[in-house]
Image: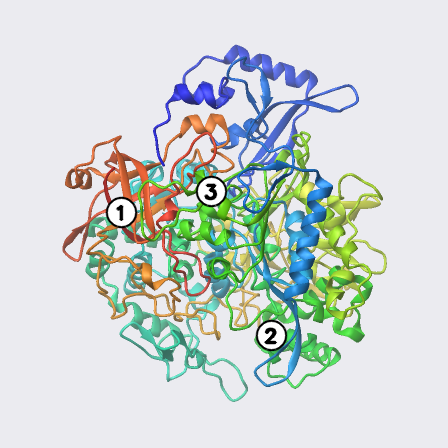
Amino acid sequence: MNSKITRRQLFKGGGIAVASLGMAAGLGFDLQATASAVKELRIKNVKGIPTVCPYCGSGCGLLVYSERDAAGKFIKLLSVEGDPDNPINQGKACAKGSSMFNLREIYDPETGKQMINPKRVQKPMYRAPGSEKWEEKEWDWMLDKIAEKVKATRDSSFIHKEKIADGSEIIVNRTEKIASIGGSPLDNEECYVLTKMMRSLGVVYLETQARLCHSPSVGGLAPSFGRGVMTNHMIDMRNTDCALVMGSNIAENHPIGMKWLLQARENRGAKIISVDPRYTRTAAVADLYAPMRSGTDIAFLGGMVKYILDNGLYLKDYVVNYTNAAMLIKDEYDFKDGLFVGYNSEKRSYDTANWDYKYDASGTIMKDETLQDPHCIFQLMKKHYSRYDVDTVCRITGTPKNKYLEVLKTFCATGAPNKTGTICYAMGITQHTVGSQNIRAFAVVQLLLGNIGRPGGGINALRGENNVQGATDMALLYHYIPGYISSPTSSAANKDLVSFVKAVTPGAAKLPITTMDEFRNAVKAGIPYSGWKVNTSKWVVSLLKAWYGDAAHKDNGFAYDYLPKRNASKDYSHMPMFEAMYKGEIDGLFVNGSNPVVGGPDANKEQEALTKLKWAVVIDLWLHETADFWTYQAWERPTKNANVKTLNPKDINTEVFFLPAAAVYEKEGTAASTGRWVQYRWKGADPVGESKADLWIYNELEKRIKKLYATSKRVEDEPITKLTWNYDEHPGAEEPDVLKVANELCGFNVADGKPVEGFAKLSDDGSTACGNWVYCGATTWKDGKFFYKAQLRNNADPSGLGLFPNWSWAWPMNRRIVYNRCSVQPDGITPWPGDEERRLVWWDPTKPADATKPDVLGTWAGFDVPDFIKGNGPTSPAFKDPFIMLPEGKGVLFASSKGAMKEGPFPEHYEPWESPLEPIINKQSMNPATKVIQPDKHGKSDKYPIIATTFRLVEHWQTGALTRNLPWLAELMPNMFVELSEELAREKGIENGQNTIISSPRGDIEAIACVTKRWKPFILDGRTVHQIGMPWQFGFKGYATGDPANRLTPIVGDANTMIPEYKAWLCDIRRA
């Protein structure tokens, strides 16, 4: 239920008495004297402890100031503010970062005295089945009970062997009765031990927030370039000549990114383009704003592709040499009426055999570098996008024609060799049924313009969680293991280690290999079209050695059998997980810094699904909506709706264990920013009450689980009993050692325990152990002791390009811009004409690639670490193949690899699942490969005529648990609201400030009307259609409350990643 909260109420009930200095100064108060006094006090007595902001993925540095006694013991927190040494934010902080003090402490509203934030949970809390209240419990009692629940559930549901399609049985070692969700707010080391623990238990329902935010980034970027990561980094935005901000409100949600774009405009004359359904804060400072209907990004970008091709604006040498444009595709390939060749309408899937390349008799991909062959990708692309003319695009998107043409002219000018353009995106691009293909469309545009691998270019995924990149790296997603290696399935192709490494190594599947020795020989001989992934066996075996130590050896396939094998035909992602939960197929759930009752699609149903569990473990700082899903408050609704149940706590038998977690600056560890910078955060304050670091919690829980299994002789329990687990600093230590986790995570030599200095030195013979190969190289042996490069704090920038190579460490191997071979022309030496300043790497024929072979000259050198094999010189066949993680070595315009993209090799526009329009550019009503989970809740435009979308606010973060519980932020943005146009408000009789009811087939919510000029009606195919938007960050807990917007959103997902379609769905609105 929604009600307006006044500032007076917040002061009285929220513990708000003193604003931060920066915030108060921003309100016009003169605090110079106070600020000077505080600065002097800090200089004399207090040292700031560096940490990293826990909110968005920018990676901003903060300093924690605290009062300590003479022995260094913590007394109280003084303040948290921006770190001026950190090159990412240079001491600046947004509203959330400026409010970090409130994570731990506030000021008493009655006395003005500093006190612990009363919303922080300080003791473990237990809710018995059917109970109406929480009970305080001791840690030992809670952890022992949880370990017992885990063991009982696992033992009663464990599948040791399973019959597969060929009739044989293989070891699968999994349970489908335990699930784990969340982890993106955690440190890398915590994510790593969490994924290790869950997989040792056999858990396959393993998900993190990445599924709901940036899973299409991996789904679209990895098939295009080889890695699913931001290609450049935040600071590099200052090097651009033009920024296309699309599907992102960067000024609001990543303000530090906006800082660098504004610097590019000031110093380089760069243009900033904002494409968004709403006139946002980004649009307000952009040079050009173009409105676009939600869910029509591919139409918009498809028209851009046509414009580039028709006007010859592509960078030809780049396209011919660095992309697969010249490669030929099978004659059988075809596209008609919105469907590619090979479609099966019953299965809603494709046979992709005829999307493959043409090969000559020697097995080499055929190509035509003149780009004239009708079967070459360049010509197929011209044909495909010939339908995307300006008029058709504008009929679909609602973008005014003059604005669209201006966008095309401005951004496509970056195809000139002396220009680069960057694309910045976020949830407005990913959260669609075509989310992965939206990003593929970006890739096509940027490859044609020559903007990948160059400073000021790239496709920059703006991640919304401080360590969602790290959580993804650590494989807190079911479908791969750490390092982006597909997780094993219950299939003949994955039955043993040799079969598995063949299956996951490009080009190896059909080789007649039955032993690891034969596989190594094949690798030495060369496996065609395998790229750098030819080393996958080394990454897999090193991971198994990290997890199982001496129990992983050659004779047992390095304990490969211990890994859980998921059912190959089953989807274990977020939405199917909650469907299984709703059906009573899951007994126990771990919730790790996640809040699906606010964040999940059709949140009403997800909340009800939690009532079907036998037990749940929630680990967080606050009793948020998911922790309190069983309370009376959780079931209040603004209207009665047949699709939404109202339950009584007495009828909810889920047993809930709440474990209080430490805040970000109350523990140590690392976080990977959206630009892949792995930064260390030091402990600046003690945990509140009895709260503990997540690393401590997982460490203690796993030790108890192992103790329960200690006497077991069952082979199916060996994944637990043989698991290496020794992270205590010393016997009886209070906290596990972060650096011990880092050593295992980043890799060590088995013989002496010292770090492996880079992934090129990993081996598949059992001599190296490495929990995640992409982090290999982040640790070293320095001055006779272990050193974690994430702790580097040298902010010198020798290149002048914003690389800062000795500040923290970036994966892979400290490369700041990936695919940087593209920063020079195909000869490897010459800069792009007129762009000498942005040459990152080059071929140096005078220096050796290997210091042990000084007579063998020729290596790649430069300002950045070359993203290339050092010895690949002009005589190498791969000299012009910059995308080393792809089999082709080329940037992918046409995704030909089997299964790479489920709905087609070229991005094609399809309408959202709920749309007010009939298809215009093809005959398909929606993405033909999307799986619809809940067809009975499909909104039709006759009943729900208004397009809706969700958005974020600078004052709040994600589901709001980490901001609505902070008084300063609650005061800034206290109420849930819906933003609508003046035209729609007149039509509906709604006035600014009135309460409204927004309805969809999933339910109703209440929100305050914010009538604004920022929304304008769209003219779509000749008729007027309205769109509204609302923040999704409110819930019924905290100082600032409101109905969750996601009670309205549909359970339908992207065909490749199953991210929900939060950004385009249908609704109606009325006065309350």
Mark 1 to mark 2 CA distance (whole Å): 47 Å
| Circle nearer the viewer, 2 or 3 | 2
* Position of residue 256 in the picture relative to residue 1042 (left or right): right
Q: Looking at the figure, which quarter contains the C terminus?
A: top left
How was this image coloured? rainbow
| Three-letter amino acid code at the position of disc 2 | Ser
| Three-letter amino acid code at the position of disc 1 | Pro
Q: Quadrant of residue 540?
A: bottom right
Please name whichever residue, 527 or 470, is drawn nearer the observer in this view of the structure.
470
Residue at 58 percent across and 58 percent down: it is 587
Determine the secondary structure under disc 1.
Answer: loop
**Who comes first in sequence, dot 1 or dot 3?**
1
Q: Can residue 825 be seen in the rendering of this structure?
A: no
Determine the secondary structure under disc 3.
Answer: loop
Mark 2 to mark 3 CA distance (whole Å): 35 Å
Mark 2 Cα-neighbour bin, 10 Å: few <14, some 14–19, many ≥20: many
Percent of width and height locating residue 868: 60, 62
Label ID, residue 291: 1
| Three-letter amino acid code at the position of disc 3 | Gln
* Position of residue 6 in the picture relative to residue 84 (left or right): left
Percent of width and height locating residue 720: 74, 61
| 95 shown above or below 615 | above
| 856 shown above or below 519 | above
Label ID, residue 490: 2
* Position of residue 920 in the picture relative to residue 217 (left or right): left
Please name whichever residue, 506 or 1063, is drawn nearer the observer in this view of the structure.
1063
Q: Can residue 955 be seen in the rendering of this structure?
A: yes
Mark 1 Cα-neighbour bin, 10 Å: few <14, some 14–19, many ≥20: many
Label ID, residue 958: 3
| 93 shown above or below 417 | above
Percent of width and height locating residue 508: 61, 79
**Who comes first in sequence, dot 1 or dot 2?**
1
